[in-house]
Amino acid sequence: MEINKKIQDKINDTFESMDAIETVKVSPFFKDKTMKRLFAEKEEEQLIWSWFSPKLQLATLVCFIVLNVLAFTQLNSNEHDSDINDFAETYGLSSGSGTSLFN
């Protein structure tokens, strides 16, 4: 019985505290201020990638293309083939009649 009375007292205290709740007075511009803060955070995230501008992207693309062209021309040169053949002969990897990926 004593446990039931303690529980009932707690329930009554809870209901009494709910009666003490009043309406909250909010500034009429609260929503505008909150939205401004949310969008300000999104703008800061965009500033992180702002240094990678289209001009820098174009310059990076040109560098990659030039490097790829240089690498391709070096790959097709005869000097490269002779270097591979010398390497293969040195380590005994050459096969007389086999095909090569670089021919």
Image: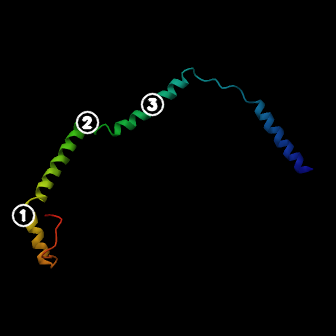
Instruction: Residue type at mark 2: give it.
Output: Pro
Q: Residue furthest right?
A: 1
Percent across and percent down for residue 23 are 69, 25
Q: Which mark is residue 47?
A: none
The residue wearing badge 3 is 39
Instruction: Residue type at mark 3: give it.
Output: Phe
Disc number lying in front (3 or 1) = 1
Q: Residue furthest bottom?
A: 92
Percent across and percent down for residue 50 are 31, 37
Nearer-the-camera pick, 77 or 19: 77
Residue 81 vs 40, above or below: the answer is: below
Q: Residue furthest front?
A: 97
Q: Which mark is residue 54?
A: 2
Label 2 packing within 10 angstroms: few (<14), some (14-19), many (20+): few
Label 1 packing within 10 angstroms: few (<14), some (14-19), many (20+): few
Nearer-the-camera pick, 31 or 77: 77
Residue at (50% x, 28% y) in the render: 35
Nearer-the-camera pick, 81 or 22: 81
- Mark 3 or mark 2, earlier in chain: 3
Percent across and percent down for residue 92 are 15, 79
